[in-house]
């Protein structure tokens, strides 16, 4: 019972940390885009706008109010899932990005599953025989991919699988917006493949390092000398011990997936929030930029919180066992 | 709370892992959940300790210093991977800087029909507008190399300074600064850069500064941890007790002792700055016309007709970055005494 209290307290602490983080992010996003640069109204209306038009738009956008009031209103809008009206198309941002959001979450979600499975699987395989073939090949490919920008990986994938000798999949993923993205799987294969290729090496390398250190620890050496088999050592000792830190690695992989999403969606002309972000930045539609940035930050912070909470629970379980003995 | 740092720390001894391998968008270290105290301790264990210069009590510090330096240099230079990396990176740099002198056409001049296949007149064919691909290729690397170098320099400089100051702070102030720092590391790097560009529009200066800003939290994190280690040493305390100011100690004691981690971090940030700038240029945000990323974007539609207009800049970027990363990886391995 003492333990349940401990877990509840930890969860409350994680939630508070996450909310504080999002608060810091919201300040950075808002003040970087809205408070620093020149005149948003002029950007929207162009150089030929009359002073009356500019003044009207400023009132309409709330730019005539004090900056802290603007921030409070913006934050309140974000909390109600209403980020405002796009400066470029003058339609609500929420309706503009809603379908793109599902598209992006579809490819990132599918990629995430593959990244976790491949990251742990290949990491364990590489650790079974350090210096063996799997280890060498995997580490070589990892280093190659880790050196390159995501879009280069995307173009290489297109060159190998979409044009040239093998034309297995279309080189552009123009989703028919009348149907959900998962009903057009042949258009999702290459973007997902690219995301998996760019995010897996980070997870894999970290798992490998964690596991290798664990397998060299005195406890494992002792277990090995006592005649416990390698498989049992891996499942019973090594993997449970790296669970909490490796969950952090998995959470961090969401960072690489969301960052990679921006370039990968652009490479394949995939209609998601990554490509929407790029076009919003080039038209300087800051309302849309703010909304997408906050969404990405929320996903990232939630991923970290979940990893932390699961990590805490696994620690708490270890604690109970120790207490019981 | 030990979770994130444990992952980070165990990554550091093999600098190619957690130490922030260029992924364009961030680094493994981005798992920053604020746990300053536990975090620092774990980071301290993990950061290569052999990097710090000789103990102050050494009998003839200068000679042991130079011996140690020459041994890591020898180890670094006699590694075949270093040689391959150096050759690849230097060849691309030479290509980008000396190349424009050998261009037979202007990079902006339309000289033939679009998407012509390679021929004697146009060794790599022509691009989407009918410009000579080889001539654009020769002039398209310099800009992003200069911008990347400056961005890493500014980013690590500012981040290093912040890191040293934060390392000297204690209590609530340090916790608060580190919390904000870690929050910045949670957000994908490309997002921070794009937000800055959305606010200021893209030109050489804003691109360089945007990428520099995105490097600051990472550099500050590493330098902060290295500084904490020095601050806990007896010679630092002795200096403080002898009445030396923090500023003087920062210059004379801290800076020389964190030079190793600072250098390793500069290598990591340099590679990532190049990656981010190349990505930005591909996404349509570059300072000048016709750099490599932009070339790839413009000609991607013709990839099945005239692949060389896309593949030649891809090869340049790949050779340059793989080379840079090999050198960086070997250098940090040699520095950490592996």
Image (cartoon, rainbow, N blue to C red):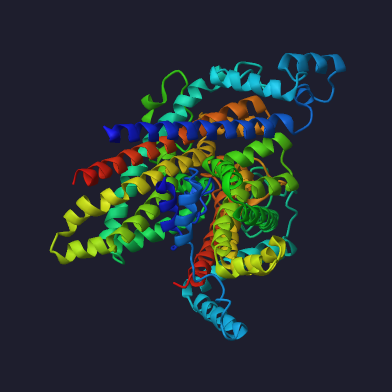
Residue A281 position, x and y percent, is 65, 33
> Of residues B250 and A212, which is closer to you in this image?
B250
Question: Does residue A133 sit above or below B275 in this rendering?
Answer: below
| Rendered location of residue B40, percent (x, y) | 50, 54
Q: Is residue B288 visible?
A: no
Of residues A322 and A102, the one drawn nearer to the viewer in this rendering: A322
Taking depth in this image into account, of B283 and B189 the one nearest to the observer is B189
Q: Quadrant of the N terminus of chain A?
A: top left
- On screen, residue A199 versus residue B95, left or right, reads left
Return the residue nearer the eye: B25 or B310: B25
Q: Quadrant of residue A77?
A: top right
- Residue A260, x across and y down, in percent: 50, 42
Residue B219 visible in the picture: yes
- Horizontally, is A140 left or right of A43 in the view? left
Q: Residue at x 49, y 35 (%)?
A: A17
A300 left or right of B87 in image:
left
Instruction: Report the residue that reaches farthest toward the right.
Output: A51
Q: Please tell me in which quadrant of the rendered image residue A162 appears.
A: top left
| Residue A140: percent from left, percent from top | 40, 61
- Which residue ends up furthest to the left in the rendered image? A227
Count of numbered circles in the view:
0
Residue at the (46%, 23%) spot, across then down:
A176
């Amino acid at each position: 019972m003492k333990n349940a209290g401990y877990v509840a307290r930890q969860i409350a602490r994680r939630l508070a940390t996450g909310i504080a983080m999002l608060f810091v992010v919201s300040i950075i996003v808002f003040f970087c885009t809205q408070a620093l640069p020149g005149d948003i109204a002029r950007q929207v209306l162009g150089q030929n706008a009359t002073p009356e038009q500019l003044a009207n738009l400023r009132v309409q956008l709330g730019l005539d109010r004090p900056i802290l009031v603007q921030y409070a209103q913006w934050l309140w809008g974000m909390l109600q899932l209403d980020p405002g009206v796009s400066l470029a198309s003058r339609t609500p941002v929420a309706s503009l990005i809603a379908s793109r959001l599902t598209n992006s979450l579809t490819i990132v979600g599918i990629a995430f599953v593959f990244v976790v499975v491949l990251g742990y699987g290949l990491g364990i395989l590489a650790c079974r025989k350090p210096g063996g073939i799997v280890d060498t090949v995997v580490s070589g490919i990892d280093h190659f991919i880790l050196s390159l920008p995501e879009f280069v990986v995307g173009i290489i994938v297109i060159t190998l699988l979409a044009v040239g000798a093998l034309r297995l999949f279309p080189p552009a993923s123009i989703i028919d917006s009348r149907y959900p993205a998962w009903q057009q799987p042949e258009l999702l294969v290459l973007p997902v493949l690219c995301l998996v290729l760019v995010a897996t090496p980070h997870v894999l390398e970290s798992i490998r390092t964690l596991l290798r250190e664990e397998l060299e620890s005195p406890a494992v050496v002792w277990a090995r000398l006592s005649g416990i088999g390698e498989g049992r050592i891996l499942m019973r000792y090594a993997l449970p011990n790296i669970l909490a830190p490796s969950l952090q690695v998995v959470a961090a992989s969401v960072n690489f997936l969301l960052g990679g999403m921006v370039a990968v969606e652009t490479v394949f002309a995939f209609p998601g929030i990554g490509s929407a972000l790029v076009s919003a930045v080039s038209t300087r539609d800051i309302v849309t930029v703010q909304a997408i940035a906050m969404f990405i930050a929320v996903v990232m912070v939630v991923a970290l919180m979940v990893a932390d909470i699961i990590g805490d629970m696994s620690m708490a379980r270890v604690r109970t066992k120790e207490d019981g003995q | 709370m030990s979770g994130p740092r444990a992952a980070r720390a165990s990554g550091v001894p093999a600098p190619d892992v957690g130490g922030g391998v260029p992924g364009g968008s961030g680094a493994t270290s981005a798992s920053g959940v604020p746990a300053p105290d536990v975090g620092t301790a774990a980071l301290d264990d993990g950061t290569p300790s052999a990097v710090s210069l000789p103990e102050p009590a050494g009998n003839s510090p200068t000679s042991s210093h130079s011996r140690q330096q020459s041994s890591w240099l020898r180890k670094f230079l006699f590694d075949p991977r270093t040689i391959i990396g150096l050759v690849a990176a230097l060849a691309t740099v030479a290509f980008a800087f000396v190349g424009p002198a050998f261009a037979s056409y202007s990079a902006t001049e339309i000289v033939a029909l679009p998407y012509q296949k390679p021929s004697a007149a146009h060794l790599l064919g022509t691009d989407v507008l009918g410009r000579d691909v080889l001539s654009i290729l020769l002039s398209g690397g310099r800009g992003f190399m200069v911008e990347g170098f400056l961005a890493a320099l500014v980013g690590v400089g500012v981040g290093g300074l912040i890191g040293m100051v934060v390392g000297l702070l204690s209590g609530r102030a340090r916790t608060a600064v580190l919390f904000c720092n870690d929050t910045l590391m949670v957000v994908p790097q490309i997002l921070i850069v794009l937000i800055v560009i959305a606010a200021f529009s893209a030109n050489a200066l804003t691109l360089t500064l945007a990428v520099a800003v995105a490097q600051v939290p990472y550099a500050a994190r590493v330098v902060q941890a290295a500084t904490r280690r020095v601050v806990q040493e007896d010679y630092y305390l002795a200096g403080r007790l002898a009445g030396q100011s923090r500023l003087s100690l920062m210059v004379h004691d801290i800076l020389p002792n964190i030079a190793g981690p600072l250098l390793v971090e500069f290598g990591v940030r340099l590679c990532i700055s190049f990656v981010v700038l190349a990505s930005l240029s591909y996404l349509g945000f570059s300072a000048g016309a016709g750099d490599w990323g932009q070339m790839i974007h413009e000609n991607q539609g013709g990839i099945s007709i005239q692949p060389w207009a896309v593949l030649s800049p891809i090869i340049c970027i790949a050779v340059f970055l793989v080379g840079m990363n090999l050198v960086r990886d070997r250098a940090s391995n040699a520095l950490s005494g592996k």
